[in-house]
Amino acid sequence: MKNFIINKQNGAVSEEFITRNIKDFHSATTYIAALPYKRNPDKSNVKCIFEDFGGTCSTKHAVLRKLAIESKKYDVKLILGIFKMDAEYTDKIRHTLEKFHLKYIPEAHNYLKIGSQYFDFTKTNSSYIQFKNKLLIEVEIEYDEIDSEKIILHKNFLKEWIAETHIPYDLNEIWDIREQCIKDLQQNEEIPVQYSSPICFLNSPEVRDEFKP
C-alpha cells in the first residue's frame, strides 16, 4: 500500500491526525483499524470517529478517504460492496435464512480501493478476502454519501434482486429479515447496531491502551 505524509495545513481531518501525532497514511490506517467499533450518532460529520472515539465501516473508511482527498491522493477510493450474506459466511443466520427459505441476503459493506488493491480497516484483522468471493456489486461512493445515500443504494439493489430472483417478499419484508439476521449476529455481542454491516462488528477489537482518552 502506498504511503504519504500528512500535512496539518491540508485540512480539518489532516489536522485531527497530526494532533494525535499520526504523521502518515499508514499510521492513520493502523489507528483507524484499532479504534473500537461503535455507532456514530452523526455520520454527516466526517470527524465523528475522533469525537466518538470509534466508528463503523462507513465512518472509518470515509475519514480515510477524506484524508486522502486533502492530501490530493485521489487514487484512494471509497467503495460500497454488496455481498451474499449466507450461512457459509456465518452459521448464526442459518435459522433465519431457512425459516424464510432464503439462500442469502445481499448485505452492504464499506472499504477502500487504492490503485488496484482493496483494503478493509474496519478492525485490526479485517480483510477484503473475507467477502471477496461473495461480492455481487461494487460501487464507488464519496465520503459524504455513507448515510442515507448508502441505504438508498442498498435498497435499490434489493428491489432489483427481488424482481430478478422472484423472491416472494417485498422490500420491507426483506429489510425486516435482514434486521433479524443482524440480531442473530449480535448473539453474545455487546455492540449496538443500527444500520451496520455484519462484517463491521463481528470480533470488534478491544480498545488499545495507547488510544484510550
Image: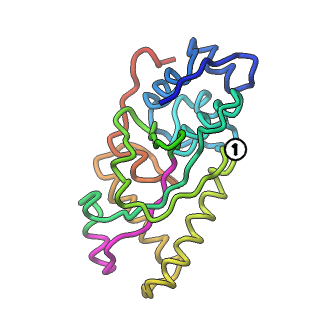
Q: Using residue 49 as the reference point, say whether residue 187 is left or right of it.
A: left
Report whether residue 112 is seen: no
Say which residue appears at 67% left-offset and 47% top-offset: 142
> Where is 173 relative to 182, above or below?
below
Say which residue appears at 44% left-offset and 88% top-offset: 166
- Looking at the rendered structure, the kind of residue marked 1 is Ser
The question of residue 103 being in magenta is answered with yes
Say which residue appears at 60% left-offset and 27% top-offset: 50
Rendering coords of residue 97 (x, y %)? 31, 72
Task: Name the quadrant containing residue 47.
Answer: top right
Q: Using residue 191 as the reference point, say whether residue 15 is left or right of it.
A: right
Q: Which residues are magenta?
A: 95-110
Q: Using residue 54 as the reference point, say whether residue 96 is left or right of it.
A: left
Say which residue appears at 61% left-offset and 20% top-offset: 17
Rendering coords of residue 212 (x, y %)? 47, 18
What is the total number of numbered labels drawn onto the structure image? 1
Q: Secondary structure at mark 1?
A: loop
Task: Name the quadrant containing residue 151.
Answer: bottom right
Rendering coords of residue 66 (x, y %)? 66, 35
